[in-house]
């Protein structure tokens, strides 16, 4: 439910949207950069799907060039296509080096920068290929029997680490060879479904020798074991790492299956010996700390060795069963085994990180007060230094000379590649986070851009030039318990304060995902504004970026303060003369969908229309239906049959389905039938309840979508249905 690994989801989502490798290829028209013409300067669904989406970014070894991928989508073809580009490190001489309907992705520089390695499905499956930086001399490097999903060449260039699926569950045909067409699945334990698939395989890391032309001596690091590495559903090559000496591989793994997997988030970092074979657990010694308690019992993920090889760092959560625990930066001395958490001065999550070249400091991404910026911390004093600032989010990092290459987006623009320059000119002089001063909200210590920032790519400039974006404004509001809450307000283009506008309350998912300066190709605030709606997007209780207490306040309190925060946001905005209090709508997905269902029974006639996507309607059924039981146990507080568990009983007493008798407002329910996180029967039940109550309702069901909507034509349908519903109930009377 929580959208926690957003930095690493794009590759998996792009693969899903184009149907994987079996049906992809040269059939159909070439899908490439759009020349769309937009009338009226307003954002449309077609404009959103015409935008190129920048993916992986790789800096050449000599730090003079940058390779990157772009995904293009075709609504008529209902699929996507990935292409590769190369430009100079200053953004000049940008050239597209592939132009076909094969899926080229994940570029990586190899052979001292003379070649670019990449994934491509030209052979019929996803394999590793290479080509010159100008796109010539393409050559397939692997002939693996199956799809390679991610890869990394060793620093010495002599080995290849790659990810591929292995079969872990016996099929019906394996058991009953005389029933080859039988489709039934026999299930004997939990985690039989996950995210959007019936679980029959697990990703494993493989190590192979590489002679410059092909691979040999392929070894499965987890051979014979049923565990995942990287971890589903969104883990990729970032969960694996080579040591600088090419003799070790660090990998992320939760060595559990079935029920044990379903109730635990305890993953660890392991180190594999390439020469000798075998691996050790770096997080635990005898699985217990000196005090007898579980050591590093939560998520430990995404290892990285320091350039000098003396240290290894990873992201670490403390508590088992809690997917939204504070994500800390752990550094281990490889000689002594000593572990330290060096991000303690930052009161929010480390979302991604990167070692500095000197092995003495680490850059990381973290969200604070609704914006994801780049920070630096060092191994000596653990102070936190902020490097960037502004109304946007950063999404990736790579060092290039004395600069940082990073992707950046905002509520008004999708990802582009930027350079943050001259990092060696100042010793990170602006320190804003320390354990004794970090809890002040809306700090008056404004942070200016102290390093020059240059935009290197302009992938969608031809589209943005045809659009007028609405103003984005941050407002601090006093909540019912006297706290301060940041609420983003997005206004229509050409906003006129003398007019009255229909207004939408946006309910965030997760539940613990930040309402930062995110850009979405579906839940896009600018397209809502282009349809003449004001959007109110509060960072309600239970979101990261405002301290640990604020983030954790939602667990076990789904119908509590977070809902009062929603009312604060819409009630405060309704005091403005340009907000039409008679035309308020409420929309959201995932936990936001739950919020919509809950608010429908408690809103006291504030709203005139609701839209719930992939939301929880019946909490008791959700507890049993969701696959990741740790989430339900932690956030709901336990099982509904635990009658003496006050937290659990409060949770289930606040189930939206118990308040249907108070529903009186039109509601649109949307769900994907491949959503195994929150099953589609939740939306069907909500729709049926509304109809039986005589409440105007509509149901949009996608048989082929999961927790998101990934296919282009389904995305267009989603947008059209979304606005048709809102316009019907919020505009038709005017």
Image: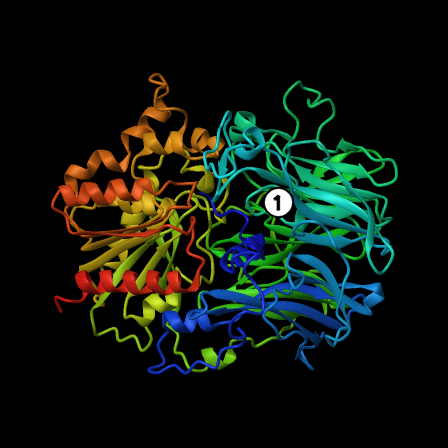
Give percent across and percent down for residue 652. 31, 29
Residue occupying the far top of the picture: 644
- Taking depth in this image into account, of 440 and 181 the one nearest to the observer is 181
- Reading the image, the residue beneath label 1 is 345
Left or right of 510 on screen, residue 267: right
Q: Can residue 424 be seen by looking at this rendering?
A: no
Q: Which residue corresponds to the image point at 40% horizontal and 79% vertical from the top-left?
A: 467
Q: Secondary structure at mark 1?
A: loop
Left or right of 3 on screen, residue 485: left
- Taking depth in this image into account, of 214 and 330 the one nearest to the observer is 214
* Scheme by which the image is coloured: rainbow
Give percent across and percent down for residue 584. 22, 58
Q: Which of the image's four quarters has the C terminus?
A: bottom left
Residue 388 position by quadrant: bottom right
Left or right of 78 on screen, residue 42: left
Give percent across and percent down for residue 675. 42, 45
Q: Which residue corresponds to the image point at 37% horizontal and 20% vertical from the top-left?
A: 645
Q: Residues within 10 Å of mark 1 (few under 14, many from 20)?
A: some
Left or right of 212 on screen, residue 38: left
Residue 356 position by quadrant: bottom right
Q: Which of the image's four quarters has the N terminus?
A: top left
- Taking depth in this image into account, of 447 and 270 the one nearest to the observer is 270
Give percent across and percent down for residue 673. 38, 46
Number of numbered tags placed on the structure image: 1
Indicate whether 276 appears above or below 382: above
Q: Can residue 306 be seen by looking at this rendering?
A: yes
Indicate whether 631 appears above or below 135: above
């Amino acid at each position: 439910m929580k959208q926690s690994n957003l930095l690493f989801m794009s590759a998996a989502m792009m693969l899903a949207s184009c149907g994987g490798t079996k049906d992809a290829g040269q059939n159909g028209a070439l899908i490439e950069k759009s020349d769309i013409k937009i009338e009226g300067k307003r954002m449309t669904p077609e404009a959103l799907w015409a935008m190129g989406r920048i993916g992986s970014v790789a800096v050449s070894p000599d730090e003079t060039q940058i390779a990157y991928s772009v995904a293009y989508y075709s609504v008529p073809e209902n699929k996507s296509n990935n292409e590769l580009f190369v430009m100079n490190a200053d953004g000049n001489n940008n050239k597209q080096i592939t132009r076909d309907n094969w899926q080229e992705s994940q570029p990586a520089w190899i052979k001292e920068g003379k070649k670019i390695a990449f994934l491509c499905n030209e052979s019929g499956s996803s394999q590793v290929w290479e080509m010159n930086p100008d796109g010539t001399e393409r050559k397939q490097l692997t002939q693996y029997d199956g799809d390679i999903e991610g890869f990394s060449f060793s620093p010495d260039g002599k080995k290849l680490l790659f990810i591929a699926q292995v079969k872990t569950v016996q099929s019906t045909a394996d058991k009953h060879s005389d029933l080859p067409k039988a489709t039934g699945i026999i299930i004997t334990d939990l985690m039989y479904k996950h995210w959007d698939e019936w679980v029959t395989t697990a990703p494993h890391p493989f190590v192979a020798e590489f002679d410059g032309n092909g691979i040999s001596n392929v070894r499965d690091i987890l051979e014979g074991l049923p565990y995942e590495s990287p971890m589903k559903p969104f883990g990729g090559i970032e969960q694996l790492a080579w040591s600088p000496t090419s003799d070790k591989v660090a990998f992320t793994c939760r060595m559990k299956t079935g029920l044990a997997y379903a109730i635990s988030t305890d993953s660890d970092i392991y180190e594999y010996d390439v020469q000798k074979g075998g691996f050790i657990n770096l997080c635990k010694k005898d699985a217990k700390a000196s005090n007898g308690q579980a050591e590093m019992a939560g998520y430990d993920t995404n290892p990285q060795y320091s350039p000098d090889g003396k240290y290894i760092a990873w992201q670490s959560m403390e508590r088992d069963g809690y997917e939204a625990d504070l994500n800390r930066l752990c550094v281990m001395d490889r000689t002594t085994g000593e572990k330290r958490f060096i991000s303690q001065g930052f009161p929010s999550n480390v979302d991604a990180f990167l070692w500095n070249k000197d092995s003495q400091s680490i850059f990381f991404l973290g969200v604070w007060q609704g914006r994801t910026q780049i920070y630096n911390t060092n191994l000596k004093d653990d102070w936190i230094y902020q490097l960037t600032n502004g109304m946007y989010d950063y999404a990736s990092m790579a060092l290039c000379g004395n600069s940082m290459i990073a992707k950046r987006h905002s509520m008004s623009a999708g990802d582009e590649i930027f350079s943050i320059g001259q990092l060696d000119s100042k010793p990170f002089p602006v320190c804003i986070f320390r354990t004794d001063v970090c809890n002040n909200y809306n700090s008056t210590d404004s942070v200016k851009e102290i390093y020059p920032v240059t935009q290197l790519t302009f992938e969608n400039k031809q589209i943005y030039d045809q659009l007028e974006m609405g103003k984005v404004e941050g407002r601090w509001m006093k909540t019912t318990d006297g706290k301060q809450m940041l609420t983003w307000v997005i206004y229509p283009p050409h906003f006129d304060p003398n007019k009255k506008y229909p207004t939408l309350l946006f309910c965030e998912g997760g539940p613990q995902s930040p309402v930062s300066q995110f850009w979405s190709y579906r839940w896009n605030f600018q397209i809502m504004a282009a349809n003449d709606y004001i959007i109110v997007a509060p960072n309600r209780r239970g979101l990261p970026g405002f301290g640990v207490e604020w983030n954790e306040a939602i667990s076990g309190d789904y119908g509590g303060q977070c809902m009062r925060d929603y009312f604060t946001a819409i009630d405060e905005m309704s005091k403005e003369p340009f907000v039409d209090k008679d035309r308020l709508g409420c929309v959201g997905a995932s936990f936001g969908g739950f919020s919509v269902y809950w608010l429908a029974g408690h809103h006291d006639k504030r709203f005139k229309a609701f839209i719930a996507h992939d939301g929880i309607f019946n909490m008791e059924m959700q507890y049993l239906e969701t696959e990741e039981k740790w989430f339900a146990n932690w956030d709901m507080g336990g099982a509904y049959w635990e009658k003496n568990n006050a937290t659990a009983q409060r949770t289930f007493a606040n189930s939206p389905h118990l308040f249907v008798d108070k529903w009186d407002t039109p509601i649109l329910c949307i769900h994907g039938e491949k959503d195994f996180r929150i099953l589609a029967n939740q939306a069907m039940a909500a729709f049926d309840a509304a109809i039986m109550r005589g409440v105007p309702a509509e149901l949009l069901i996608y048989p082929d979508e999961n927790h998101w909507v990934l296919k282009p034509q389904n995305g267009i349908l989603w947008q059209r249905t979304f606005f048709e519903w809102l316009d019907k109930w919020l505009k038709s009377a005017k």
